[in-house]
Image (cartoon, grey):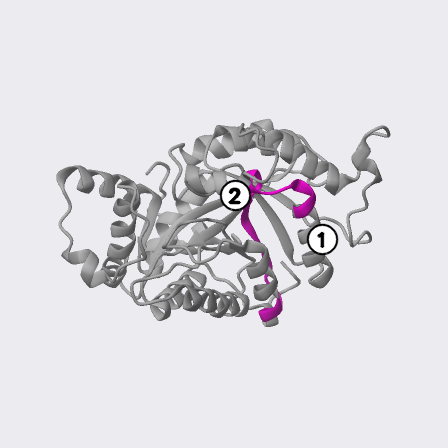
Amino acid sequence: MRGLAVGLPRAQICAMLPLSVLDLSFTTTATSGAQALRNSLDLARLADRLGYRRYWVAEHHNLPSVASGAPEIMIGAIAAATHHIRVGAGGVMLPNHAPLMVAERFKVLEALYPGRIDLGIGRAPGTDPLTTLALRRRQDGRGEDDFLERFQELMLWKSGAFPENHPFRKIRVMPEDVPVPPVWLLGSGEYSARLAGEVGLGFAFAHHFASLEAEEAMELYRESFRPSTWLERPYAILATAVVCADSDEAAERLAATADHAYIRRWRGDYGPLVSPEEALAYRYTPSEEEARRANRRRLFVGSPDTVARHLGAFARAVRADEIMVTTAIFDHAARKRSYELFARAFGLVPPATSQGTP
């Protein structure tokens, strides 16, 4: 991993970088889908108390390892269960939805929880081709990549700037007196980085599964950035995977689950997370072991000091403005502990004692 300033003091590396959560509502061999959703609510309450800035939930379909396919519903439930933290989609997969419906749903959320909602937009469908067909076959049926067209329409619903002669100008998106919340573009490649910059939106880079180097994506976004009505200066979130425990050894044990899950996905198997014991008992083939080791470049594992030193330096090297963490741990209590230790390592201050609102 490039740019790691291993010798810097932790306080210097980590000073005041906001931290956020990306939650996929993972199922496990011991956790049902319903319990995984309840665990998300529990983790969100903890993140709110600890001082995390955002809690984003993902949209995936037909994946046995991910319980939530409806981020809007989860956002409403999480916002109702928390007090300070911003809650959003990480993200809404726009190819699956009519832009008008997205605007309506998020205006409702913004009306109910003003100033606390984020709308992250993704370009991929978040599923396999057959499920994509099922999601879209009652729409216009063109079957082409029309993301840019949908995205442009969504931004017109947000700005209300349809041309005078456009028929959609007559449509009133309710509640009319509430804005569409801040829009973020999510991505793992050059396309989203460049588009986010050109339209002047915040950018969240999915380092945890991207093939593009984070430094390249972040630089492309900043070079492409043009100030807009919504954002004067570029703002880039680094989304990455972390497993944190009281010691490096304990973290490595927990991370065996994440290693195993990655190799299963690499083979096209999206089953629930397995326990560290089952993961450690698995014997990787030489090609699987090579893939596992390569993926470790995108996974930060260790004690609070170890994770803060390496991830903090990496985030600064790529000029991230914020770190968003996803954590695939089998045991819910251990997952919560990981976020607690991570918050402590980066010096988060709980909202009740913080200076001002993040």
Dot 1 surroundings within 10 Å: few (below 14), some, or many (20 or more)? Answer: many
Q: In this view, does 256 lie above or below 209?
A: below
Q: Does the magenta stretch include residue 36?
A: no
Quadrant containing the C terminus is bottom right
Q: Which of marks 1 and 2 is nearer the N terminus?
A: 1
Q: Residue at x 44, y 34 (%)?
A: 215
- Pair 1/2: label in front: 2
Q: Mark 2 points at which residue?
A: 135
Q: In which quarter of the image is residue 285?
A: top left
**Span colored in magenta:** 80-101
Q: Mark 1 points at which residue?
A: 107
Of 219 and 334, the residue lying toward us: 334
Q: Which residue is drawn at 62% across and 68% down?
A: 80
Q: Can residue 72 be seen in this view?
A: yes
Of 139 and 85, the residue lying toward us: 139
Left or right of 203: which side holds 10? left
Which secondary structure lies at badge 1? helix
Which secondary structure lies at badge 2? helix
